[in-house]
Image: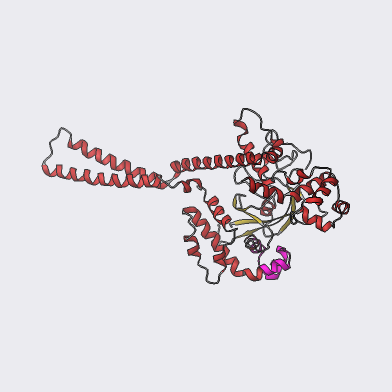
Amino acid sequence: MLEELALVTQRLAGSRIREKRLDRGLRQAAVAETVGISPSYLNLIEHNRRRIGGKLLSDIARVLGVEPALLVDGADADMLDQMRHAASQFEADLPAKVEVARAEEMAARYPGWGALIVAQSERIAALGGQVQALSDRMSHDPQLAGSLHDVITAVSAIRSAAQILVGPEKLDEDWQRRFHENIHNDSLRLANSSEALVAYLEAPDADIDQADPAEQLERYLAKTGFHLAPLEAPDADLQKLVADSGLRDGAKALLESQATQYLKDAALLPLAGFEDACRVRNYNPAALAQAFQASFATVLRRLASLPTGQGHPPIGMAACDAAGVLTLVKPVPGFALPRTGGACPLWPLYAALNRPAQPIRLEVALPGSSATRLLCYAIADTRPSPRFDVPTPVQSTMLVMPDPPETASIAQPVGVSCRICPRANCASRREPAMKGVRVETAL
């Protein structure tokens, strides 16, 4: 695990150079001229597209006034977010205040301990979900209620027949035979009902750990990079894909729905031609929608499903329904939305719900000293219903592209969730930040 973290921090050296440069108010051109490279090459370094080391790293560190090690050995931003989230979840149960402001220092100096905190937080969250799932199952599961009813009914019938047989009234042999037969049949029914109940309660651990169908679906899609290669073929077999997925119940139904939409999108925008067009048009959704005469939402979904390892940039995605409930999230470095606790409402994903059918392009900035920028495209589209007086289903889709080229425009401030957001005067804040979060004075 430590070797993996070392590779991650090495790749993030460019981000730290950019962070330190912005902190000191230096322009790219000025730094590049001082160290003897072109501004475009420094831009590639700052966006982690060129590795850096040796004399060039020392020269840049000297211009920025920092030790070279600080540019290479910093903490992974994703790990920091996860550590802060862990602190926000358990703050009320701890005897002492968590030093959230020193999370980066700890993660940088002790990456193994940072990874352990994150792993334990995820495990606790999984166990909490397991307990909640079992609680909901006991309270609301109709199959469980039906099985218990069958057991109780069989027990009551056996007890009633037995009371008559042992009662003071003497029964002739014919009636005794009938009651014995009833008890026998009810005993068999009780045994079958009990076996069915035990089998239903003894669900495999993997199913309990992945109790939420949406999480099961996302874990399955994450293994494929959200690219369903079998559905790209002309003779694609959707049902075989679903059957071979290993998912169960609700997750399988969600996959079938997702795969059905995927198959339609693949037919409208075949992969080979779409990949070439993406490279030519620099992955611009509006240009691609115009070129293919396809809907904006279709293009966003196809961009998010491009295969990894083919030279395409990292592309994230999120989708939600009309209530703002996240239905699908494809995270990428620098971008992730929490399913629990409520995501920041300032993301274009939610703004699109108020402007149906209108495409949105917005550059956003996350809080913190690094001020990570993301380029977002979003649209909310409707699904027409063939019946009268039925609410029209609405789905909002947002595409996220990390590391956009630097522009003169001011990025829209967004956050992850209110509990770990340092922006004090945000009009959309639902709850105050947890203790220890360094609060900024202005948006």
Query: Closest to the observer: 119 or 162?
Result: 119
Q: Where is residue 116 in the image (x, y as percent from the top left)?
A: 60, 40
Q: Write the residue at 52% across / 51% down.
A: 213
Q: Can residue 410 be seen in this view?
A: no
Q: Can residue 125 be seen in this view?
A: yes
Query: Closest to the observer: 69 or 79?
Result: 69
Q: Quadrant of residue 280?
A: bottom right
In the figure, 350 relative to 256: above or below? above
What is the number of callouts on the image? 0
Q: Where is residue 426 in the image (x, y as percent from the top left)?
A: 74, 41
* Residue interval drawn in magenta: 275-301
Residue 17 on the magenta span: no
Which residue appears farthest toward the top when viewing the image? 95
In the figure, 84 relative to 373: above or below? above
Q: What colour-coding does the image apply?
A: secondary structure
Q: Where is residue 395 in the image (x, y as percent from the top left)?
A: 61, 56
Relative placement, left or right, of 45 versus 114 is: right
Query: Closest to the observer: 268 or 115?
Result: 115
Which residue appears farthest toward the front when viewing the image? 54
Q: In which quarter of the image is residue 164?
A: top left
Q: Please identify the quadrant where the C terminus is shown.
A: top right
Q: Write the residue at 21% across / 35% down.
A: 163
Q: Where is residue 88 in the image (x, y as percent from the top left)?
A: 64, 37
* Magenta highlight: main SS: helix
Q: In which quarter of the image is residue 102?
A: top right
Q: Write the residue at 47% across / 60% down.
A: 244
Residue 277 on the magenta span: yes
Query: Closest to the observer: 45 or 264?
Result: 45
